[in-house]
Amino acid sequence: MMLAVQNLVINYGAIQAVKGISFDVAERELVALIGSNGAGKSTTLRTISGIVRPASGSLTYDGKDLSSMPTHQIVSSGIVQSPEGRQIFGSLTVRENLLLGATSQSDRSTFDDDLERVFGLFPLLQERIGQRAGTLSGGEQQMLAIGRALMARPRLLLLDEPSLGLAPIVVNRIFAVIRQLKEQGVTILLVEQNARKALAVADRAYVLETGLITLSGPARELARNPAVEQAYLGGGVAL
């Protein structure tokens, strides 16, 4: 397995946000974590990225222990996160934001090739290349956040709530790109509020509820599971 998470416990002060979860992600696989707000999904991604440190459990990536590895080394090893809320640099241009994404790359000669790849996925970013990122629409900012992550050439891409707050037409475009990335062989761990979209694109999925994994399996099977359908797919409920 590319990523193996075993008995992961994450505390925020006296609160146990994640209560001993285990899951894995294989190379070239797209795995989704779904569940209600506060279930521990984003906290799990932030721990894999090294932003939050686990209380106990193990995080193994390509056989290496991530639990005490500095964040910059985690990024250099190939794990890159597109964070919830986008977190682009509004005062910088689109190009400057994308350049920041490439800072972990030792071979800067590939920058133009990587830039062309991002523009192939998100043509609107090429049109806005000299525009300050803070003046972009929400959808364009999300495209920029994913593009910035791709500039680091991730082997494992962590996507945290990529559809949050976006219009349906933009959500469809974002998920079309996620599907393209999967077809190109990028390994993806997806945390997503739109369970229907997540299960439609994922190979496998895990359901988190109050810090525990309560269901897991092939995404298509979970989409047909009555409990998942009632809790997360019925009546247009957004996670």
Image (spheres, rainbow, N blue to C red):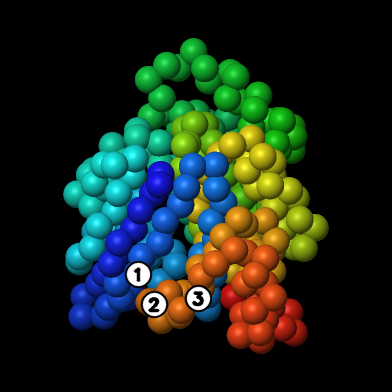
Left or right, residue 106 beside residue 193? left
| Mark seen at residue 215 | 3
Marks 2/3: CA distance? 9 Å
The residue mark sitting in front, 2 or 3, is 3
Q: Quadrant of residue 113?
A: top right
Number of labels in the image equals 3
Disc on the earlier residue, 2 or 1: 1
User: Does dot 2 land on a helix, a strand or a loop?
Assistant: strand
The reply to whether discs 2 and 1 touch (Cβ–Cβ < 8 Å) is yes
Q: Measured along the vertical axis of the image, is residue 145 above or below residue 130?
A: below
Horizontally, is 82 left or right of 54 in the view?
right
Q: Residue at x 26, y 42 (%)?
A: 64
Q: Residue at x 62, y 57 (%)?
A: 202
Spot occupied by residue 104 in the image (x, y as percentages of width and height)? 38, 29
Numbered tag placed on residue 207 in the rendering: none
Instruction: Tell me the crowding category of disc 3: few under 14, some 14 to 19, or many 20 or more residues within 10 angstroms, Cα based.
Output: some
- Of 129 and 98, which appears nearest the observer? 98
166, above or below 178, in the image: below
Residue at the spot 44% in from the left edge and 67% down from the top edge:
41
Tell which of 172 and 148 is nearer to you.
Answer: 172
Q: Amino acid at mark 2?
A: Leu
Q: Is any atom of residue 105 visible in this view? A: yes
Question: Can you tell which mark lies on residue 212?
Answer: 2
Q: Which residue is the site of mark 1?
A: 21
